[in-house]
Image (spheres, coloured by chain):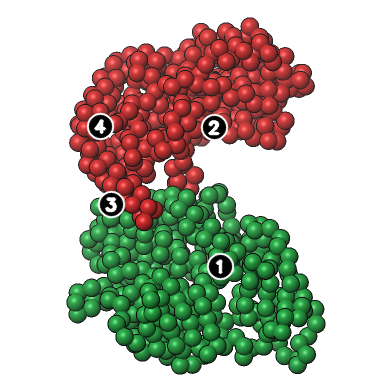
């Protein structure tokens, strides 16, 4: 069994969620149908919605079920942009953190390219946290033309938590609604939608032990949103499509379980993560840990490092060959790792950013996994650095 | 051995990887991403730079049960192959980008990285053989199937790199055999068409590609007597021996077809003339790569100047670090920039880049 240290990409389905999914797969019933099978399905959906709402501190009617985090982010950002622009055509500016996930980043860029949006990317500091003074300044200057602020709850690469609540206070004072991509946060750190002040929040089931293909946009009551997907008018009319009852129930079961053990898991994973980081730093000189060093300011199970004179794809291969599964952390196109926009925004130069590795710990992670990663690290780095040197020698000759 | 199988997404490299697995090697598949825009999805003739090809390669690796990775070599590919291609045309020469890719990417950047990461060899789907010389050194030989033989584009690979190269298709009887084997192994690429284009010019319009990179550089087309017979938009649109698309508005006085004889980018001039003026009997070539020690005296060889051209009998000797090749039979359409590969029987004696051609 390889040491799976890539839980931020997806984490194993919880057994109780798997059981719930399997049970529901045996039932017929469209949750929109009025007969008894339909009513049964509807009841499962609504009970699941209640459980999910409770897990994230939201009202039951605020939960809009989607096919996952990417759809929720698309709906939140596009839906808010279009609704705000329709209400006042001057509102075309989107404020977005510079380290957002591609599910937000690419949506914002698409709106800029095709829908006339102006974008202000909010800079981040060296740990990847957004600069609230920059936010205040742009709000002071442009409040009337801002459509929305979008700011992730926790960064998927370096794990840094963003000051969503304080950002929302600033935005609300200027009358600007806030979307937050909480895909990496839900089930891992306390997420209270009501207390956060966010107006919409994206979550994804498979990041906390639910099935892939399920997610939700939590949407503040009474907030206007333009639908992205049209059809049967399900989910308050903003997200049409027949509900996937088994996945919805699996998501709710997983969310409840994850939130129930959140505190103890955070302590357990935090300790393992610290051991891992200490081991990596000890094994190889020049390794730098990225993201917030303060445990209160980051996801408990994330360990992001950059290794000098290495290509991330070499490291990934060498660790994989030694039974250690992790990630470079950045998005891939056709499987090709690119220098991470997150690391570049944090001020790293592209060469440093090339040697990025993200280890993300989760529910099934053990001390043995951490030991395996630490043991494999130094020999992998040694070889990866040799490959970089070989390339340089060839180019020089 | 630990073998890195370069997998383009085509049938040849997939079967080559399969044969390496069968031979008992520990094989890892790698697809080289060579394009700056990996999102480009193209259909029809195939090369090596698309999402579709990467997926085909991945599926072949799945069927073989080997690990698979995509490595980004686009930076070095653009600098060493694409930009070199443009610069060579701009200088009035005729480059072969596949030769350059083998020289600078597959058996250089990729092989270096593979060796450093702990692999013993790189395996590709080329049709060629590596044979042990009596002194134990690795020597490049033609493939068993002369029709598919690709030793010409590999002739720039030095023995030190050949030492770590595997060409499992070198002994294949024919491409049909390879396709049948792919079918038998359940590889979905069995019926995928061969790639003929330059992979970074997917629409096949080399002149258009060069125009985009070099801009319009109009000049004159003249005959051997220096008389202007037409105009052109850039000398890079021509190669020596070319007959079509010369932009000549009147026929030759003798009514016979005209061909490009030479190109002078500095004067923006293309010289055209009759077929017999294309005949080359002597050429000089630089930067030789020898499959073993350089020959000391003149040596009788067969000289080949194109990937799928005939080899003609010739005498080669080293003169001041360059190679002089006296062809016993004339060749036509030989241009500076092309590689000349020298064979003794099936063995590649060496190769060099043509700098000068002469009719006598």
- Label 4 is found on which chain of the structure? A
**How far, Cα to Cα, is label 1 from label 2?**
36 Å
Judging from the image, what secondary structure is the residue with disc 2 in? helix
Judging from the image, what secondary structure is the residue with disc 4 in? loop
Q: What percent of the width, then of the height, locates residue B354?
A: 48, 75
Compared with residue B7, is residue A49 higher up or lower down, i.e. above or below? above
Judging from the image, what secondary structure is the residue with disc 1 in? loop
Of mark 3 and mark 1, the one earlier in the sequence is 3
Mark 3, residue position:
B116
Residue drawn at the location 31% of the way across and 65% of the way down: B161
Chain A colour is: red
Mark 1, residue position:
B197
Tags 1 and 2 touching, CB below 8 Å: no
**Discs 2/3, front:** 3
Image mark for residue A103: 2
Chain B colour is: green
**How far, Cα to Cα, is label 4 from label 2?**
35 Å
**How far, Cα to Cα, is label 4 from label 1?**
47 Å
């Amino acid at each position: 069994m390889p040491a799976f240290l890539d839980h931020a990409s997806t984490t194993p389905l919880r057994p109780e969620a798997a059981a719930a999914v399997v049970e529901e797969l045996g039932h017929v019933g469209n949750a929109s149908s009025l007969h008894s099978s339909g009513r049964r399905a509807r009841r499962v959906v609504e009970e699941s919605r209640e459980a999910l709402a409770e897990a994230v501190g939201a009202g039951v009617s605020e939960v809009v079920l989607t096919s996952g985090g990417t759809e929720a982010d698309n709906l939140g950002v596009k839906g808010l942009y279009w609704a705000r622009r329709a209400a006042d055509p001057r509102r075309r500016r989107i404020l977005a953190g510079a380290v957002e996930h591609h599910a937000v980043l690419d949506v914002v860029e698409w709106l800029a390219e095709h829908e006339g949006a102006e974008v202000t990317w909010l800079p981040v500091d060296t740990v990847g946290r957004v600069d609230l003074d920059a936010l205040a300044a742009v709000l002071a200057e442009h409040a009337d033309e801002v459509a929305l602020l979008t700011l992730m709850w926790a960064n998927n690469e370096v794990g840094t938590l963003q000051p969503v609540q304080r950002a929302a206070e600033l935005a609300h004072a200027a009358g600007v609604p806030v979307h937050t991509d909480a895909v990496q946060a839900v089930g891992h750190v306390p997420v209270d939608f009501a207390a956060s002040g966010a107006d919409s929040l994206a979550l994804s089931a498979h990041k906390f032990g639910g099935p892939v293909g399920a997610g939700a946009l939590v949407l503040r009551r009474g907030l206007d949103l333009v639908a992205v997907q049209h059809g049967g008018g399900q989910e308050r009319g903003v997200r049409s499509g027949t509900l996937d009852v088994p996945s919805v129930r699996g998501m709710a079961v997983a969310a409840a379980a994850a939130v129930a053990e959140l505190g103890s898991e955070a302590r357990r994973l935090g300790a393992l993560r610290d051991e891992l980081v200490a081991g990596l730093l000890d094994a190889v000189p020049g390794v730098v840990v990225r993201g917030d060093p303060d445990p209160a300011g980051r996801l408990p199970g994330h360990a992001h490092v950059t290794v000098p004179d290495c290509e991330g794809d070499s490291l990934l291969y060498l660790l994989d060959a030694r039974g250690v599964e992790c990630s470079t952390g950045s998005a891939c196109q056709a499987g090709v790792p690119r220098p991470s926009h997150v690391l570049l925004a944090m001020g790293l130069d592209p060469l440093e950013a090339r040697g990025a590795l993200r280890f993300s710990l989760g529910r099934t992670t053990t001390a043995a996994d951490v030991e395996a990663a630490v043991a494999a690290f130094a020999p992998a780095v040694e070889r990866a650095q040799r490959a970089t040197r070989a390339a340089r020698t060839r180019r020089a000759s | 051995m630990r073998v890195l199988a370069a997998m383009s997404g085509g049938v040849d490299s997939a079967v080559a990887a399969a044969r390496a697995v069968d031979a008992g090697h520990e094989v890892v598949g790698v697809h080289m991403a060579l394009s700056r825009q990996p999102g480009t999805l193209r259909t029809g003739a195939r090369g090596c730079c698309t999402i579709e090809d990467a997926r085909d390669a991945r599926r072949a690796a799945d069927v073989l049960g080997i690990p698979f990775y995509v490595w980004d070599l686009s930076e070095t590919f653009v600098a060493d192959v694409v930009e070199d291609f443009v610069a060579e045309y701009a200088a009035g020469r005729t480059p072969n980008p596949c030769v350059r890719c083998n020289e600078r990417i597959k058996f250089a950047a990729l092989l270096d990285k593979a060796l450093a990461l702990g692999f013993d060899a790189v395996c590709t789907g080329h049709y060629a053989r590596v044979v042990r010389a009596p002194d134990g050194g690795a020597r490049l030989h033609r493939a068993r199937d002369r029709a598919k033989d690709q030793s010409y584009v590999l002739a720039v690979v030095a023995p030190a790199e050949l030492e770590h190269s595997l060409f499992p298709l070198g002994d294949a009887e024919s491409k049909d055999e390879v396709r049948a084997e792919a079918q038998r192994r359940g590889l979905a690429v069995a019926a995928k068409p061969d790639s003929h284009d330059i992979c970074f010019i997917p629409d096949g319009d080399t002149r258009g590609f060069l125009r985009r990179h070099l801009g319009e550089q109009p000049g004159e087309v003249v005959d051997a007597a220096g008389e202007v017979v037409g105009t052109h938009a850039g000398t890079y649109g021509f190669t020596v021996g070319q007959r079509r698309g010369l932009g000549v508005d009147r026929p030759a006085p003798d009514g016979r077809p005209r061909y490009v004889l030479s190109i002078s980018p500095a004067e923006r001039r293309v010289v055209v003339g009759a077929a017999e003026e294309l005949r080359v009997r002597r050429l000089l070539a630089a930067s030789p790569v020898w499959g073993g020690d350089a020959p000391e005296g003149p040596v009788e060889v067969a000289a080949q100047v194109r990937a799928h051209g005939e080899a003609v009998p010739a005498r080669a000797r080293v003169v001041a670090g360059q190679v002089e090749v006296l062809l016993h039979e004339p060749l036509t359409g030989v241009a500076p920039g092309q590689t000349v590969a020298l064979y003794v029987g099936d063995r590649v004696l060496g190769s060099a880049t043509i700098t000068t051609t002469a009719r006598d």
